[in-house]
Amino acid sequence: MINLIGLNPRLVIATVLGGGVFGDHCSPISDTTIISSMASATDHVRTQLPYALIAGGLVLGLFLMFGFIF
C-alpha cells in the first residue's frame, strides 16, 4: 500500500514510531508519564514538555526534509 502511493516505507515506519513515542511522552494520561511523575515526585508533563516540544520540532523538520528528498 505504501509503495502504491510513492512513500518510502522506512520513513513511514520511523514517523509512526516516533509519533507514538512523542505522544506517549507528552500525554498527561499516559501510564509511563504518571509512573515517572510519581517516582520523581514532580509534574513530569510540565517539566519535560518544553524539551519534548523542542526535540519534536527538530524531528518534524527532519522528517519533512527527508520526505521531500526521498
Image (cartoon, rainbow, N blue to C red):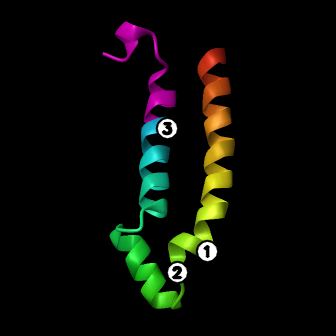
Of discs 1 and 3, which sits in the foreground? Answer: 1
For marks 2 and 3, the one nearer the N-term is 3
- In three-dimensional space, the C-alpha distance between marks 2 and 3, rounded to whole angstroms, equals 29 Å
Q: Residues within 10 Å of mark 1 (few under 14, many from 20)?
A: few
Q: Amino acid at mark 2?
A: Asp
Residue bearing mark 2: 43
Question: What span is in magenta?
Answer: 1-14
Q: Position of residue 59 (x, y in %)?
A: 64, 42
For marks 1 and 3, the one nearer the N-term is 3
Q: Position of residue 60 (x, y in %)?
A: 61, 38
Whether residue 43 is in magenta: the answer is no
CB within 8 Å, label 1 to label 2: yes
For residue 52, say whether it is visible: yes
Q: Amino acid at mark 1?
A: Thr
Q: Amino acid at mark 3?
A: Ala
Whether residue 12 is in magenta: the answer is yes
As drawn, the residue found furthest toward the left would be 1
Q: Residues within 10 Å of mark 2 (few under 14, many from 20)?
A: some
As drawn, the residue found furthest toward the front would be 46
Residue 47 is labelled as 1
* Quadrant hosting residue 63: top right
